[in-house]
Image (spheres, grey):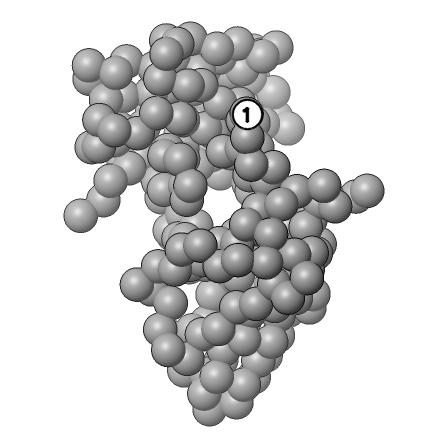
Amino acid sequence: DTGVSQDPRHKITKRGQNVTFRCDPISEHNRLYWYRQTLGQGPEFLTYFQNEAQLEKSRLLSDRFSAERPKGSFSTLEIQRTEQGDSAMYLCASSLAGLGDNEQFFGPGTRLTVL
Amino acid sequence: DQQVKQNSPSLSVQEGRISILNCDYTNSMFDYFLWYKKYPAEGPTFLISISSIKDKNEDGRFTVFLNKSAKHLSLHIVPSQPGDSAVYFCAVGNTPLVFGKGTRLSVIA
């Protein structure tokens, strides 16, 4: 197991297009998180899953954003009708609920540029 | 309003000396505190953590101190090495984590 992986690493799209990102967590981890990071800021929470259930969503997650984790393994994050303000690094993290579950392990991120 | 503040955007330290990175938080209900290190073009890497029942946790060259009454934590790196040059994020909370804006550490050889 090589840790959390994300695909693609980079995405350039035109305003108004839809994009989808994928995250594969560490295999035994049952929690999966999505964060967004912009320049000069720390990661900001978007949403998280425990197994296939989406347990919490941030107010940052507008109606244009949707996340799924259909089988409790990998997750996808879709952004519809992208806007220039969506340009950011999208980070996925995973953890194992229980002792020390706050220790979230991050993937390399997907950098989105909306032109 | 920021719940987690890292007031120093950057810090330069000579190799071999101590690096001290600071973090303040506002919510006394937070009970778990972490430090992450981030290199360019990579995701944050977990470094060290501490729960609210402790005031110190040590792992090799890295020590985290927690002062609950002051709502303050710090990360000490001794001795600092050039490979420690990165952005360091303080993160607090349960699920989800709340991150500070980061401090860029430069260790000069």
Picture quadrant of residue A72:
bottom right
Q: Is residue A42 above or below residue A70?
A: above
On the question of residue A4 being in view, the answer is yes
At mark 1, the secondary structure is loop
Q: Residue at x 53, y 58 (%)?
A: A53
Picture quadrant of residue A46:
bottom left
Image position of B85 (left or right of B29): right
On the question of residue A34 being in view, the answer is no
Q: Which residue is mark 1?
A: A99
Q: Nearer the viewer, residue B15 or A90?
A: A90
Residue A76 place in picture, x, y as percent: 61, 68
Residue B83 place in picture, x, y as percent: 64, 28
Check the residue under mark 1 and report the chain it is in.
Answer: A
Residue B99 place in picture, x, y as percent: 38, 41
Mark 1, residues whose alpha carbon is within 10 Å: few (<14), some, or many (≥20)? few
Q: Is residue A38 above or below residue B91?
A: below
Q: Residue at x 43, y 50 (%)?
A: A43
Q: Residue at x 81, y 42 (%)?
A: A1
Residue A84 place in picture, x, y as percent: 41, 80
Q: Is residue A39 above or below residue A61?
A: above
Q: Residue at x 72, y 41 (%)?
A: A28
Amino acid on which disc 1 is placed: Leu
Q: Nearer the viewer, residue A109 or B41?
A: A109
Exactly how many numbered labels are in the figure? Answer: 1
